[in-house]
Amino acid sequence: MHVVVTGASGRLGRSVCAALVAAGHVVVGLDRSPAGLDGVDEIQLELTDEAAVARLLADTRPDAVIHLAGIAVPFSAPEREILLTNTSLAHTVLAAAARGGVARVLAASSPTVIGYGSPGWRAASVPIDERHALAPTNAYALSKVVIEDTVRMFSRTSNGAFGFFRPCYVVSPEEWAGAPTQQGHTMAERLTDPALAAVSLFNYVDARDAAEFVDAWLAAPAAAVDGEGFFVGAADSLAVRPVAELWRDFAPGLGEAAELLTGTQPVFDIGKAERRLGWAPTRSWRTELDEASVTSVTASVIRSHETRAS
């Protein structure tokens, strides 16, 4: 396929572009600045320019558009700016794709749409699946709700297949290697102290697994993805101890249903993506952190738990 990826220089965008190139797709990456991506035709483009976006799609005539661009971190800009930026970019790109007759359009959403981890929030069921009610509590989450509804609108009114996915907390390869995360601490530190995870507690996905989901989404029958959304996460939680032992201290909103989670079973259910697309993640913190880090983190957590229990 000929695929256009917006936000190609971002943490997720880089991995998506690399995976699509490796799978044999012809990839055009759009962003404000190039990232030097191998095998990708990188184009600098301001996505707020509707005419420019329409011209680019008319010139490139892609089979698919993957929309990842936007303000990616809650509270990293004024609330109004986050809401207006993310929703306007999505509508501009999706509308241009619909007018241009693009066959496949996939937009990035977020688990924040359900209000997970917010004060006073309570899970309707655990593990959490795509049927859970929406309850955004900030402009970032609200922007993602609007994006999901924008996808559904174009799914109803256009010939192409439009869908969205909710990647859990995205971890890039360099962050597994020790680079600081967006919050300034390392992945090993997040594992050692779950409180550092904030609203992304226990949920995560390797950027390369998320990228492979995108490729699986492109290959799936249109009827399986049109108008549909998917949680995309790792096959376990970002925790050394079982979530059933941790939820009261760190995620009380999960409620007693979390007691039924086995071991470090993920809080977010990724079964829909497995059933419909045949996609399953292959990476976890156990496979991606080096052996010394895994040993150190595990020992530190066990010591801390024993100290608190004594």
Image (cartoon, grey):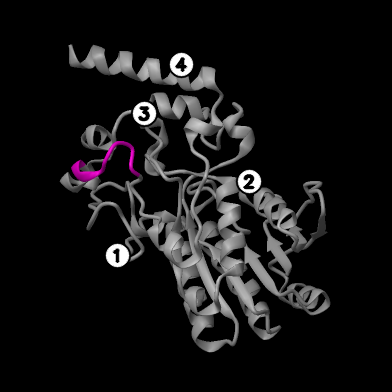
Q: Nearer the viewer, mark 1 or mark 3?
A: 3
Q: Earlier in the sequence, mark 1 or mark 2?
A: 2
The rendered magenta stretch, by its main secondary structure, is classed as: loop
Local SS, label 4: helix
Find residue 68 and report its horizontal and vertical position in percent: 61, 59
* Residue 107, percent from left and from top: 56, 66
Name which of mark 2 and mark 3 comes first in the sequence.
2
Q: Looking at the rendered structure, which numbered label has been put on residue 240?
A: 3
Viewport quadrant of the N terminus: bottom right
Which secondary structure lies at badge 2? helix
Q: Residues within 10 Å of mark 3 (few under 14, many from 20)?
A: many
Q: Amino acid at mark 2?
A: Arg
Q: Is residue 260 magenta?
A: yes
Does the segment drawn in magenta span residue 48?
no
The residue singled out by tag 2 in the image is 11
Determine whether label 1 and label 2 are within 8 Å by CB.
Answer: no
Q: Kindly check if marks 3 and 4 are in contact, taking CB atoms under 8 A apart as contact.
A: no
